[in-house]
Amino acid sequence: MLFHLKNQLAKQGFNLWKFLLAQHTWLSSGKEYHALPATIRRSINRQQDGSERLIGWIQISIISLFAVLYFAAPQPPSEAQFESVPVLLGTHFVFTCFRLWLSYKTSLPLWFLVVSIFMDVALLFGSIWSFHLEYGQPPAFYLKSPTMLYAFIFIGIRALRFEPGYVLLAGLVSSGGWFLLVLFAIFAHPGGLPITEDYVEYLTANRVLIGGEIDKIISIMLVTTVLTVAIARARKLLIRAIVEGSAAASLSHFVPEGIADRIATAEGPLSDVKTEEREATILFSDLVSFTQMSEGLKPDELITTANEFFALASESIKRHKGVIILFHGDAIMASFNLPSSDTEHASNAVATAIEIQQRLQTHEFSTGVKLKARIGINTGAVVGGFAGASGLLNYTLYGDNVNIAARLEELNKQHGTSILVSERTVELSDQQRFQFEPKGSEVLRGRRGAINIFTPTLTDHAE
């Protein structure tokens, strides 16, 4: 009977192994993981590799603590020719150190992680099994060892990988391992079966209470089930967080950081996000004679040159706390103080314009061309918000003051200047940092009243 039971257990163990390998997608990260883009999977894998290293360090700490407690306790005389517990602890320690070292070298493969779980449980329960040899007692003696609680720890730390399959596997192997220990304690007991129904006798003698051991196995499986469900839910949240983080990072390539933050924190449809009205400084920049110059450039050279200019201008705009609202052809529209707050928005916009012009004077573009830009700046009340159809929205600015900045950029042609600013921009700018040369009054296209215009330069003190 015992031989037949052993064969059945071996067969079931082999079937369990084949089943686990067949379910490798669920054991690792699940079907939704394999549907993700490669960049996101790599990000998740880095998280899991870090978790595996953390698991290794925790296990080393547990094994070390177990060893300290074992060697610190009084050692009774043993009839065994050699002490098996130190050997098993040492083997477990060496194996865990090897796994930890390997986790720093590469991502641990599925088969190795599965083997690790079997090894952890086998070495732990092997240590428990050897207690009856160390103390010269019948096998039922080790069933009362509190060391079996370490099984819950080894199951729990598997939750650090955010992959429920490994938690479930650790629980199944632990339950099966304890079941085998119970069978050994029953059938290897000298002098007949040590089964009892008396709870007092179970606690005070080397007897086996079947119900008590079943309770332990049920407890292992209940804890495993709860952790498995919790990690399955947490894994979905982890993947969602990584996907959203990746989307936000990708979004930053298409919209400015201030606008990306607004999108990320929006509650409900973007079209319902409340618009903002405040005084801001608007900067318009356009390249001089770029259309004519493009006739002598190939299409790829044209895009390369435009992108080089956009990169140059963007660096200056971002450095002075501006937000790029729009790229259009070879033109740039930037805003200071909306959507991102900036108390010195006028001065920062003027500093940006001067810096762009200075950099264009010395910058050598890869296509060999030399570029010049015209810039118009105006300060006034504007409205910012998301506009467009429900399926395609853009963050944009509205108001007459936006139009004034665009008209000032065009007016540079008439005055032979490279930067023109409005009177309100002058009023709010740092007079010790900039000086403003009056360029008279102009009635801008589409407007009735005239406005005073100026061209800025850095003061000697600022330079």
Image: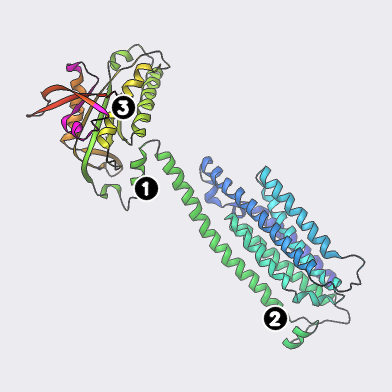
Label of residue 462 in the image: 3
Q: Quadrant of the C terminus?
A: top left
| Residue 89 drawn above or below residue 339 | below
**Image position, residue 17 (x, y; %):** 71, 57
Neighbourhood count class around disc 1 (C-alpha, 10 Å): few under 14, some 14–19, many 20 upward? some
Question: Residue at coordinates 88% horizontally, 79% vertically from top-left?
Answer: 190
Residue 399 placement, left or right of 105 = left
**Image position, residue 436 (x, y; %):** 20, 25
Q: Amino acid at mark 1?
A: Ala
Magenta-colored span: 413-434
Say if mark 1 contacts mark 2, CB within 8 Å: no
Way the structure is coloured: rainbow
Say if mark 3 contacts mark 1, CB within 8 Å: no
Residue annotated with mark 2: 211
Farthest residue in the top direction? 296
Secondary structure at numbered mark 2: helix
**Image position, residue 107 (x, y; %):** 65, 45
Q: Amino acid at mark 2?
A: Gly
Q: Earlier in the sequence, mark 3 or mark 1?
A: 1
Residue 43 placement, left or right of 250 = right
**Residue 390 among magenta residues:** no
Q: Work out how far the residue at label 1 is from the one at label 2, CA to CA, in angstroms.
A: 55 Å
Q: Earlier in the sequence, mark 2 or mark 3?
A: 2
Q: Work out how far the residue at label 3 is from the one at label 1, CA to CA, in angstroms.
A: 38 Å
| Residue 205 drawn above or below residue 298 | below
Q: Amino acid at mark 3?
A: Ala
Residue annotated with mark 1: 264
Secondary structure at numbered mark 1: helix
Question: Residue at coordinates 69% horizontally, 66% vertically from top-left?
Answer: 151
